[in-house]
Image (cartoon, rainbow, N blue to C red):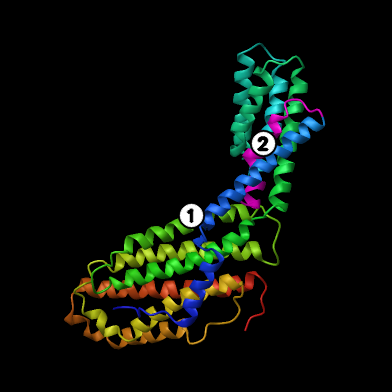
Amino acid sequence: MRLMANKTWSQQQLAKKLQADRPERAGWLSFEHRRLLIHAAKTALSAGLCWWLATRFGLHDGYWGAISAIIVLQSNFGSTITASRDRLLGTLIGAVFGFSFSFFGTLPWNYILAVLAAMTVCGLLGFRSSSRLAGVTITIVMLVQNATSHWTVALDRVGQVVLGIVVALLVSTLVFPDRARLRLRDGLAQEFLVLGAFFEAILQGFGGMPPANLATTREDALAFLRGNNELLEAARNEPSGGPGWREGLSMLAQFGRSIFDALVALEFAVQDSHDDKYVQQLEPALGRLAVDIRSGFHYLASCIHAWRFHVPPKEIDLEEDIAQLEARMEAVRHTGVQYSQAEILRAYAVQLHLKQIARLLRASRVETSRAIGEAQK
């Protein structure tokens, strides 16, 4: 069975629109290079502001604020919030433990115990990302030679970190702001287009030889899943962008993972099917369902891009396709004695996976529409 090779005009428009929003090249400078330069400029601005503020107000060791700003300022606002939280918690815990253990015993034993205790507490409280930063702060408080007291060093350290975090958050918010949730929305739209390409590549190998791009499309889909999962974690820390944004994005990411797992199962199911004849008995119902699933991937990507899910796709009725396929399987069941058990089992496995993918696609649109509070049509 082969899927139709030509895209519809609406699918071509969607692909062009997504490419325009995330172009590979803009003149001589690619989009990723521009993002890299903007991030570098924002980081340099944050570090410079921290240093200027520290010298302006006579703060000791002003470079710590600049270092903190460089560390916490990430490529998007959500990731900056996450890094800021981890650094602030680690600094506070390290300052408290470093100052407290400076009164117990002598170096190096009190220092070793302080690092051990702080990292253990961070782990038990679920602040694993902050544990190393706590150890760094303890090292500065207890080991850096300074004429002032350990308490003063701890306070200076916390103050400088807070300064770096505040400046980084302000720059991330006000200067060329980059929201993780917006990048995730476009990333999910691209993800479903790639999942659709993976689906097409799998079915091109059903009843024939697997296409050369099968492994590539699988890796592309997996890369999108991983990248969007990282963006989702960052987006959860951002202020809400409207009703149901977090719920909708989380739901789509979860459905994307489920569909990818179903596609991998379908890939295994179609292996060694190049000589199968029984599956031809299921046409045209099986082919119609496959074509509508392919169109469903593109339609869902367009819904994500527009962030509108309540309008059912025209000329695509996946439940009706499933019903017709089940009726066709029932009609040809008596012919199974003419074929090998292996190809009959493959045909049943393929139709089961196709039905699962179709229902996941439909549920992705319907459940996301409910999550963001759209009026159903």
Q: Is residue 62 above or below residue 78?
A: above
The crowding category of the residue bearing disc 1, from other C-alpha atoms within 10 Å (few below 14, some 14 to 19, many at least 20), is few
Secondary structure under tag 1 reads helix
Q: What is the quadrant of the N terminus in the image? A: bottom left
As for residue 66 lying within the magenta part, the answer is yes
Residue 147: x, y in percent? 75, 14
In-image side of 255 versus 104 (left or right)? left
Q: Which residue is mark 1?
A: 226
Q: Which residue is mark 2?
A: 68
Q: Nearer the viewer, residue 188 or 366?
A: 188
Residue 172 relative to residue 256: left or right: right
Relative image position of residue 339 (x, y in whole percent): 18, 78
Q: What amino acid is at disc 1?
A: Arg
Q: Which residues are magenta?
A: 58-81
Q: From what the image shows, is residue 36 above or below residue 306?
A: above
User: In the picture, residue 143 is in which quadrant?
Assistant: top right
Instruction: Give the left or right position of residue 377, taking residue 280 as reference.
Output: right
Q: Is residue 82 visible?
A: no
Q: Position of residue 361 (x, y in %)?
A: 48, 73
